[in-house]
């Protein structure tokens, strides 16, 4: 049984349950499909989360399952990136040395985002193990990395045996930023979980959007677009799932636009809650300015919902116009027109779901990832010989 050590920069935890849950989902799936998986994550958190959660967590926590071990270390951030990076590195090396004393040696290391790259490359040099890196960070698209961060990312990418991005568009953007080639491997979802509900279920929302309430998610434009549909021949209802720093401003905007009766801010919902809302909605909305993949769009399509989205970097690769969604311009008037069109179009919701299953199911993507691991391990063994 091959041993995979996963070193994430983001990971769901007791302080932030919704922090990149897809990374943990992938780790659990690798264990389910026959690999021995260990996750080591130094979990730095902002002091605002201490007040929000009303708890302070310090030190190590472990979780064990079949073929799966999760080691998290909690510490507060300084919000000085070089300092926080150094602290994470010190903690990560300490945790890995503890594993080594137990006799643990991985066959491959998988880092998620460049921020985990230094720790992965330290271990590569220590025990001659191959490293792969998957990049997810929208900061490359938003061009917000400092020179220090970009140089660090480039060094980590250059040192990896293989680099992956979650969409073709993002792989192209990363190549333009770093001059390096990235293999494309999308995220996946549990298509058996995200499935259509009973056809008799009452539809409550005409439009649904799920995501952190951040400026890059562009919910303000979505509200403006919906306001152009109201008043009309029928009443429209929009549900917005998520929490974030933009919430108060968005609630105020909805009130200003006269949408109080038409918009529900639903707060954080777990996976079951999101699935149930998808089952009671007609159209899924992605108004984002920047996305690297758009996993929520795949969840919606797996339930059978068409998607109305902007050209934001990754999600549009999963959409075929007129088949499973509409790609709209990122302005309120054009987006409103796309929403109206989506509501009257005769979508084949069974076909929408089937395409999501064929391309983004757990079995399909994990099979590809295992093949990538085997290729990288085989190449490394060939070099050793």
Image (cartoon, helix red, strand yellow):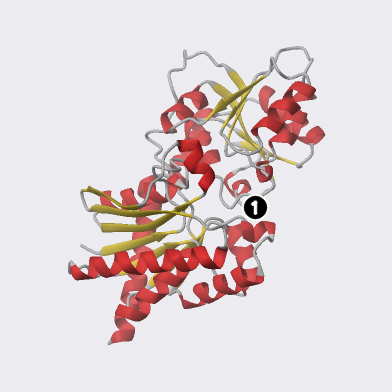
- Residue 297 image offset from top left, x and y in percent: 55, 39
- Whether residue 279 is visible here, answered yes or no, is yes
Residue at the spot 22% in from the left edge and 47% down from the top edge: 65
What is the quadrant of residue 14 in the picture? Answer: top left
Quarter that holds the N terminus: bottom left
Quadrant assignment for the C terminus: bottom left
Q: Quadrant of residue 180?
A: bottom right
In percent of width and height, residue 75 lies at: 42, 54
Position of residue 158 in the picture relative to residue 385 (left or right): right
- In the image, taking residue 179 as reference, residue 105 lies left or right, namely left
Q: Tag 1: Cα neighbours inside 10 Å, few (<14), some, or many (≥20)?
A: many
From this view, report whether residue 289 is shown above or below residue 381: above
Kindly tell me whether residue 114 is visible in this rendering.
Answer: no
Residue 217 spot, x, y in % from top left: 65, 42
Residue at the far bottom in the pictured view: 385
- Asked whether 358 or 143 is in front, the reply is 143
Nearest to the observer: residue 103 or residue 110? 103
* Residue sitting at x 73%, y 32%: 338
For this view, does 35 lie left or right of residue 274? left
SS type, badge 1: loop
């Amino acid at each position: 049984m091959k041993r995979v050590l996963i070193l994430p920069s983001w990971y769901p935890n007791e302080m932030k349950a919704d922090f990149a849950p897809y990374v943990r989902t992938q780790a659990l799936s690798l264990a389910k499909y026959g690999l021995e998986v260990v996750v080591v994550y130094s979990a730095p958190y902002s002091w605002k989360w201490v007040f929000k959660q009303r708890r302070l967590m310090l030190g190590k926590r472990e979780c064990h399952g079949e073929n799966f071990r999760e080691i998290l270390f909690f510490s507060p951030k300084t919000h000085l990136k070089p300092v926080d990076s150094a602290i994470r590195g010190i903690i990560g090396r300490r945790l890995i040395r503890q594993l080594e004393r137990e006799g643990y040696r991985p066959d491959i290391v998988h880092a998620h985002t460049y921020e985990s790259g230094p720790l992965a490359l330290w271990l590569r040099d220590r025990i001659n193990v191959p490293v792969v890196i998957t990049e997810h960070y929208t900061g490359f698209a938003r061009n917000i990395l400092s020179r220090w961060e970009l140089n660090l990312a480039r060094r980590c990418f250059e040192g990896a045996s293989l680099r992956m991005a979650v969409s073709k568009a993002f792989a192209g953007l990363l190549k333009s930023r770093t001059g390096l080639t990235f293999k494309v491997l999308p995220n996946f979802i549990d298509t058996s979980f995200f499935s259509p509900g009973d056809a008799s279920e009452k539809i409550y929302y005409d439009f649904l959007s799920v995501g952190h309430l951040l400026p890059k998610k562009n919910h303000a434009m979505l509200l403006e677009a919906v306001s152009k549909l109201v008043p009309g021949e029928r009443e429209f209802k929009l549900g917005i799932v998520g929490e974030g720093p933009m919430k108060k401003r968005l609630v105020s905007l909805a009130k200003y636009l006269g949408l109080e009766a038409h918009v529900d801010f639903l707060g954080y919902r777990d996976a079951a809650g999101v699935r149930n809302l998808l089952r009671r909605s007609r159209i899924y909305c992605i108004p984002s300015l920047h996305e690297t993949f758009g996993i929520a769009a795949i969840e919606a399509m797996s339930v059978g919902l068409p998607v109305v989205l902007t050209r934001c970097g990754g999600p549009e690769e999963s959409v075929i116009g007129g088949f499973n969604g509409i790609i709209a311009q990122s302005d309120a008037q054009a987006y409103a027109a796309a929403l109206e069109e989506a509501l009257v179009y005769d979508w084949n919701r069974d076909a929408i779901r089937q395409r999501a299953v064929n391309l983004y199911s757990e079995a399909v993507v994990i099979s590809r990832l295992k093949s990538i691991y085997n290729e990288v391990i085989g190449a490394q063994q060939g070099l050793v010989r």
